[in-house]
Amino acid sequence: MEHYNIHFSPTGGTRKVADIICGALDGEFNEIDLCSNIEKTSLGEDDICLVSVPSYGGRVPATAIERLKKISSNGAKAVLNCVYGNRAWEDTLTELQDTLEEQGFRCVAALATVAEHSIFRQFATGRPDENDNAELIEMAGNIQERLDEDFTGPLVLEGSHGTYKEFGGSPLKPFGNESCSGCGLCAKKCPVAAIDAQNPKTTDPEKCISCMRCISICPKGARGVDPALLATISERISPHLGGRKDNHLFL
């Protein structure tokens, strides 16, 4: 039996939550990073996976789905983890469940958890925090009990299955400024190869998924988005992102 921590976490928030959960479950977890263009992978029937994705506009990022489809589950068990930035996860969990079950995974539990928003950092700032840490460890204990029971399903998640809300992407596309040193780290780490290594100040808007990884890893702080557009969108959505949203466990 092998254990896998499978995650798509461009700015690190989703992985932070995933690492807390994996650390509280039994077993040593191997990492599969969906931000990389992974090779086809085959799992075993007895394997256990935590599959974590962020919610982008209430959906699973299309890039994550493409790479999850490279994994042959062979009936491995999956714990689903949707990480949202203090707004809502909407169809993310049901889309993730549908995707994994199409790949033959046996879904045994699911979580909707909170991490600092990857674009609007003033929302859920610093989360997961100490309170989240304690709560996630407790939830992991409940999940471990489910795994020890050898639950055979089905896992029932409310919401849309097969038909999901429309999400056309974010208009916020990062670019480099005069502080850019041309090191090329952003181009190397971009999950969708939207940045030209020879001209890293630019971003291909057709490829960019607005994951903000390039901003989070730039050693010079030389990448950002249009500040006026950022402020406008922030003001519009702020009523939906206020307060402290909860983590949820579904068994």
Image: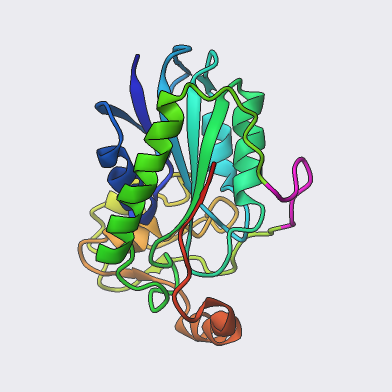
Q: Residue drawn at (70%, 49%), measured in percent from left and top?
A: 158
* Residue 163 among those drawn in magenta: yes
Q: Quadrant of residue 178?
A: bottom left
Instruction: Give how far across and how far down residue 192 sits, in percent.
Output: 48, 44
Q: Residue drawn at (46%, 24%), measured in percent from left and top?
A: 149
Q: Is residue 49 above or below residue 210?
A: above
Q: Quadrant of residue 4?
A: top left
Q: Quadrant of residue 215?
A: bottom left
Q: Is residue 129 visible?
A: no
Q: Is residue 123 above or below residue 198?
A: below
Q: Residue drawn at (54%, 16%), measured in percent from left and top?
A: 75
Q: Nearer the viewer, residue 78 or 148?
A: 148
Residues drawn in magenta? 158-166
* Residue 15 among those drawn in magenta: no
Q: Is residue 65 visible?
A: yes
Instruction: Give how far across and how far down residue 21 sits, in percent.
Output: 33, 44
Q: Is residue 89 above or below residue 20?
A: below
Instruction: Give how far across and how far down residue 48 sits, in percent.
Output: 41, 24
Q: Nearer the viewer, residue 227 or 81?
A: 81
Quadrant in the picture for the N terminus: top left
